[in-house]
Every structure is written in C-alpha cells, then in structure tokens.
Image (tube, rainbow, N blue to C red):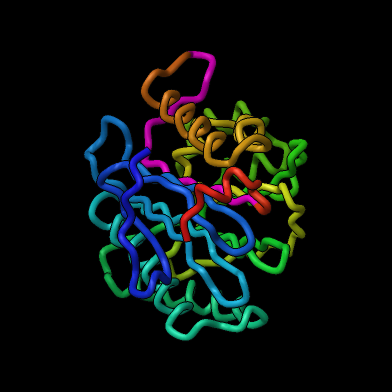
C-alpha cells in the first residue's frame, strides 16, 4: 500500500478524499490504527470517500469515515466538509474527554448545516468510532458501518445501516446473503445534507486488549460479509491482516465470481486494535 497522507496543522488530523490509493499504520489513542482509502477500481479515479484519524485529549481519538452521495462533485464535497468540520470543531481547543461527546454531536450538526448551505443537494454518510478510556462508542448517519469484535471472533457491536435493506436484515427479514446482494442495497434513508438528519448514538462498549474496531464505507461492506471481515482481522499482526483484508475486497471488485459478493466502489477502511504487540509497536508512526 502507498502511504501518502496530507497532514493538518500540528498533526491534529489526517484525511483524504482519495484520487490515489493511500494507506498506512499509525499509533492512536491507546493502540494502533491501520487505514486504507482508494477510488473505485475502473472508475473515474476521483473518490467520494474521505477518512480521518483525529487525536483528542486524554489518550482518546475519533476514527471517521464519510461516503459522499449524489455523484461528483457534490458527494465528494460533502464528505470533505464533514471531515473538515469535525477536525476544526474538535481540535481548535482540545476537549476534555468527559465532554467530548456533546461537542461531537454539535460538530456533526454543524457539518450537516454546512452541507445544507451549499444548496446543491450534496449529501454524505458519516461513521465515527470514539475511542478512549478503554472503550468505544459509535456515532453514525447513513450506511457506513462500525463493527467491534474480539480475538476469538465474537461480535460485540455492529451498527445498523440507515437503509431499508439494513433495517430488514437486522430485523431478521433478510439473511446476510440476501441483504448483501439486494437490488435496493444502495438506497440510504439518512444522511448529512438533509434537514431531517438524525444521529444514532450507540452504547459505550468496553474494549479488551485485543479487540478490533472497524469503521468502513460500503466499498468494504458490499464486498465482504461481516464474518469474513472478522475472520480476516481478529488475530495476527494488525497491519498484515489488514492488508490481506483490503486485497480480498479489491479482488472481489475486480475479479467477480458468481458465488461471491462483488460491487466495485470507492473504499475506505480504518481498523483499530488495543495492545497491538511488540513487533507492531516498532513499526508504528505517531
């Protein structure tokens, strides 16, 4: 993977609406995060996704993925605005970890209003995992996903996509195979850039030392089942497991097989793990 990310002033955040594939590994909060962002293979070469890793006070951080909607340039612009707003609102004066949650909600509301002010119908999904104090909490709008699982593969948290197909799957009306291949899977019922935007806030989930948190756009979720993502990342060095997972998703997009999901799309993924191990610690960047 090519590691090439622009850095915000004072290293306060990193993001990318990718025109080239980018990826890397960095130290964050009390663990390590691997990240990857790439335009759709065979597409226009301009991604509507953006991602960010935003350090906060008190050994906390936000892992953020935004998936722009509505076609270029509107979706791309909306995703970039969402990321920029969170970085600007939450790092101008580093918040106390005990009050960061209310500031995060305000920042998401601010991003929604900024996108509405463009006035051209731009919209984006947003998925945020708040990491800190040995726990994770999910905030999301739309169908970008957040998944948390243990080293033995136990699923501990899975966000519910804000879409008709997502609701049907989690209600038990569709199985995973039916949901991932459904013709209406692309329809989204909630997004930044809409006046009725709503933020879903999950419960705080304690993180064990080797738990993994994944935040991703549907470029991953439409090509790998949750079980495949868990199996690919639950054990082994994070960076090597992550590279294998991304390669598998990209192969699904470019070399479709009839018995496997395949939907070419922009892809953005962040995977975080506490206590990454001594060998990985030596490869980490701040």
Task: Answer whether residue 267 is magenta in the image.
Answer: yes
Task: Answer whether residue 256 is magenta in the image.
Answer: no
Image quadrant assignment for residue 228: top right
Q: Residue at x 71, y 44 (%)?
A: 149
In the displayed structure, does residue 50 sit left or right of residue 134? left
Q: Residue at x 38, y 31 (%)?
A: 264
In this view, the residue farthest toward the bottom is 93
Find the magenta span and give its range. 258-273
Q: Is residue 42 above or below residue 14?
A: above
Residue 235, position as x, y percentages in the image: 68, 36
Q: Which is more toward the observer, 97 or 220?
A: 97
Q: Is residue 137 above or below residue 163?
A: below
Q: Which is more toward the observer, 74 or 51?
A: 51
In the displayed structure, does residue 7 sit left or right of residue 59? left
Asked if one can make out residue 145 in the rendered structure from this viewpoint, the answer is no
Residue 30, position as x, y percentages in the image: 64, 62
Q: Which is more toward the observer, 267 or 183?
A: 267
* Image quadrant occupied by the N terminus: top left
Asked if one can make out residue 39 in the rendered structure from this viewpoint, the answer is yes
Residue 45, position as x, y percentages in the image: 23, 40
Image quadrant assignment for residue 104: bottom right
Total labels: the figure holds 0
Q: Residue at x 62, y 56 (%)?
A: 31
Q: Residue at x 31, y 32 (%)?
A: 41
Residue 223, position as x, y percentages in the image: 50, 31
In this view, the residue farthest toward the top is 258
Image quadrant assignment for residue 89: bottom left
């Amino acid at each position: 993977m090519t590691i090439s990310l622009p850095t915000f002033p004072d290293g306060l955040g990193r993001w990318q609406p990718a025109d080239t594939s980018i990826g890397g590994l960095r130290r964050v909060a009390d663990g390590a995060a691997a990240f990857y962002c790439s335009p759709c293979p065979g597409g226009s070469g301009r991604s509507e996704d953006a991602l960010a890793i935003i350090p906060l006070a008190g050994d906390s951080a936000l892992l953020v993925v935004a998936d722009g909607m509505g076609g270029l340039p509107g979706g791309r612009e909306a995703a970039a605005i969402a990321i920029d707003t969170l970085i600007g609102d939450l790092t101008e004066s580093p918040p106390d970890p005990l009050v960061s949650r209310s500031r995060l909600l305000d920042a998401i509301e601010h991003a929604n209003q900024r996108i509405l002010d463009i006035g051209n119908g731009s919209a984006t999904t947003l998925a945020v995992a708040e990491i800190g104090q040995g726990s994770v909490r999910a905030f999301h709008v739309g169908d970008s996903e957040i998944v948390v699982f243990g080293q033995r593969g136990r699923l501990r948290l899975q966000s519910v996509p804000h879409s008709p197909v997502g609701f049907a799957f989690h209600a038990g009306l569709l199985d995973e195979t039916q949901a991932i291949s459904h013709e209406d899977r692309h329809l989204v019922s909630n997004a930044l850039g809409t006046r009725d935007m709503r933020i879903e806030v999950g419960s705080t989930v304690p993180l064990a030392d080797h738990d993994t948190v994944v935040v991703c756009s549907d470029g991953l979720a439409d090509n790998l089942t949750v079980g495949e993502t868990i199996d690919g990342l639950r054990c082994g060095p994070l960076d090597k497991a992550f590279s294998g997972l991304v390669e598998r998703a990209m192969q699904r997009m470019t070399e479709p097989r009839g018995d496997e999901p395949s939907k070419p799309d922009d892809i953005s993924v962040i995977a975080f793990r506490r206590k990454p191990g001594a060998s990985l610690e030596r490869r980490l960047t701040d």
